[in-house]
């Protein structure tokens, strides 16, 4: 298994996918945190928010990186189907070990993305509010939000990996991850706010402690996420075992 | 007593929906031989090789390597080198990095990468991105990957495709050297003239098995042309499955 992990780790860092997705996640999050900073500045002037809440919003904006962690997970699997190198991976590593190694490497890259997000969220809390001539107020809640952003990144990458194994096509898997995160789950949240808390990406909202929606408790949300990951992982592994590699 | 076969197909049939790619395929490959798996495009050559390697499940029958299914064979990735037309390099890599990935996955020392790069003549291009490689260079890289574990058996799918005349001559010499060392080579091809100069044994496949045996027997020790015998056995026009 060690050899499989070493090979997959080198593979994961090959090409530009990981850096492009990481930079994209950082860029989107910076833009969003500035948006929250701007709105927060007005709210502070009007007295409708306090500095701690604005700081929380700016830090929470970094949850966007989990979308890119999920995309990376999907791409790291499906690009091998595109090139045909998946057959060699199966021949060299074996289906079970390959599944485990890609899962582990995906989670590791998710952790890397999460660590970058947390560091950047701290910097943005200081930097964004400094642009508006304000200090920031880091509270225990802010720490929990930052921790939630990290956990979401770690969990999103395996989600993408599993979807990649199931879908086996790069564009289709990217569209699926983005569609679920940006359209389907938020859409269902509008239609059925209570029930939508059990959707994967909406459950993530509980973990990074989103506000303004009906959400599960973080503990319940983590159980829901574990259930989704177990179901997707089971389907992905089962399909990898039985489907032909043509 | 003769040595046990390295490769055996027992009544292998593979269907994709309504299409039968290979049907009731039974043949064996003896050790130390270069064996040409011949057939037209769509005759089922690649499907047969994928069944052999456990990448595709046969509908009926089974195939074995050294007496085991690929996935049950101890140390299979180090004993069997594979180059297939449809297996590309890792996306976004250079030739050297692609080989390093597989060397690490196989638990091989890094120096093996330099060895095989030298063996296939890619040392000077090793640090270029594979995306910029010519077809012949990609073919050499695929062969380098197959040679990486110094395998007992090579399974090569259309290894001549894309090689220039120098490359073809080099490959022929390489395969002869490997066979002289006691290794076995199973290569698929539709280039009959090339195969005639390289192989010891021939398997002719046109969805079903049409011939399996020594090249010399098929061509009456060279009195007949392989091409003529191929068309006699495979039929004048394609009649097999549409999947290869």
Image: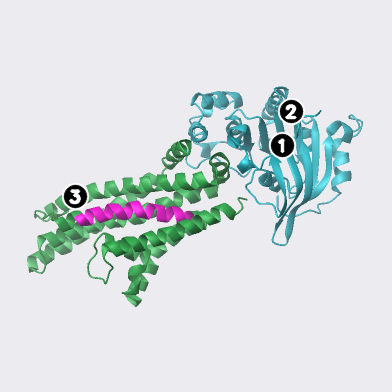
Between the residue at mark 3 and the residue at mark 2, the CA separation in whole angstroms equals 65 Å
Q: Are marks 3 and 2 on the same chain?
A: no
Residue B191 seen in the current view = no
- In screen coordinates, is B124 left or right of A198? right
Q: Is residue A119 above or below residue B160?
A: below
Given this view, does label 2 or label 1 mark the residue nearer the observer?
A: 2
Locate the N terminus of chain B by quadrant: top right
Q: Label 1, on which residue? A: B187
Q: Is residue A95 above or below residue A67?
A: above
Q: For label 2, count other residues whose C-alpha is less than 10 Å away and answer few (under 14), some (14-19) or many (20+).
A: some
The range drawn in magenta is A144-164
The image shows residue A75 at horizontal and vertical percentages of 45, 51
Q: Are marks 3 and 1 on the same chain?
A: no
- In screen coordinates, is A240 left or right of B30? left
**Disc 2, disc 1: CB below 8 Å?**
no
Q: Residue B164 lies in what quarter of the image?
A: top right
The image shows residue B109 at horizontal and vertical percentages of 49, 26
The image shows residue A246 at horizontal and vertical percentages of 63, 50
Is B4 or A12 nearer to us in this picture?
Answer: B4
Q: Which chain is cyan?
A: B
Tell me, for residue B32, which label it has, or none: 2
Q: Tag 2, which chain?
A: B
Q: Secondary structure at mark 2?
A: loop
Q: Which of the two discs, 2 and 1, labels the residue nearer the N terminus?
A: 2
In the image, is residue A148 part of the stretch drawn in magenta? yes
Between the residue at mark 3 and the residue at mark 1, the CA separation in whole angstroms equals 59 Å
Q: Tag 1, which chain?
A: B
Q: Secondary structure at mark 1?
A: strand
Given this view, does label 3 or label 2 mark the residue nearer the observer?
A: 2
Tell me, for residue A122, which label it has, or none: 3
Q: Colour of chain A?
A: green
Q: How is the image coloured?
A: by chain
């Amino acid at each position: 298994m060690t050899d499989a992990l070493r090979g997959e780790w080198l593979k994961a860092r090959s090409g530009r996918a990981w850096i492009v997705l990481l930079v994209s996640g950082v860029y989107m999050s910076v833009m969003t945190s500035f948006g929250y900073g701007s709105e927060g500045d007005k709210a502070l002037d009007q007295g409708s928010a306090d500095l701690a809440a604005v700081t929380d919003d700016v830090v929470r904006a970094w949850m966007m990186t989990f979308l890119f962690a999920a995309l990376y997970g999907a791409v790291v699997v499906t690009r091998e189907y595109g090139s045909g190198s998946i057959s060699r991976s199966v021949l060299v590593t074996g289906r079970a070990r390959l599944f485990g190694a890609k899962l582990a490497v995906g989670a590791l890259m998710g952790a890397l993305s999460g660590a970058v997000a947390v560091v950047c969220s701290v910097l943005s809390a200081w930097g964004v509010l400094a642009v508006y001539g304000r200090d920031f107020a880091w509270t225990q809640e802010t720490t929990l939000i930052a921790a939630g952003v990290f956990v979401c990144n770690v969990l999103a990458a395996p989600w993408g990996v599993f979807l990649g194994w199931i879908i086996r096509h790069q564009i289709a898997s990217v569209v699926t991850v983005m569609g679920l995160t940006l359209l389907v789950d938020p859409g269902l949240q509008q239609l059925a706010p209570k029930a939508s808390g059990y959707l994967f990406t909406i459950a993530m909202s509980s973990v990074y402690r989103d506000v303004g929606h009906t959400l599960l408790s973080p503990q319940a949300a983590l159980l829901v996420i574990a259930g989704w990951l177990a179901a997707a992982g089971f389907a992905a592994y089962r399909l990898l075992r039985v489907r032909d590699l043509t | 007593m003769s040595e046990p076969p390295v490769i055996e197909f027992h009544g292998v049939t593979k269907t994709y929906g309504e299409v039968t790619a290979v049907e009731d395929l039974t043949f064996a490959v003896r050790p130390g031989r270069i064996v040409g798996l011949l057939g037209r495009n769509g005759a089922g050559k690649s499907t047969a090789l994928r069944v052999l390697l456990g990448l595709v499940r046969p509908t009926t029958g089974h195939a074995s390597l050294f007496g085991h299914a690929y996935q049950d064979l101890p140390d299979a990735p180090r004993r069997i080198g594979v180059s297939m037309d449809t297996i590309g390099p890792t996306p976004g890599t250079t030739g050297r990095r692609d080989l390093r990935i597989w060397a690490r996955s196989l638990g091989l020392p890094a120096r093996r990468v330099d060895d095989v790069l030298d063996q296939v003549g890619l040392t000077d291009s090793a640090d270029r991105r594979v995306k910029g490689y010519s077809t012949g260079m990609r073919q050499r890289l695929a062969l380098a990957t197959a040679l990486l574990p110094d395998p007992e058996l090579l399974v090569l799918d259309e290894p001549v495709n894309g090689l220039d005349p120098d490359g073809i001559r080099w490959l022929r010499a390489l395969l002869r050297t490997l066979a002289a060392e006691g290794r076995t080579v199973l290569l698929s091809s539709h280039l009959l003239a090339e195969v005639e100069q390289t192989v010891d044994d021939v398997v002719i496949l046109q969805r079903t098995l049409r011939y399996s045996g020594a090249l010399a027997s098929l061509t009456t020790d060279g009195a007949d042309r392989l091409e003529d015998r191929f068309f006699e056995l495979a039929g004048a026009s394609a009649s097999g499955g549409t999947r290869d």
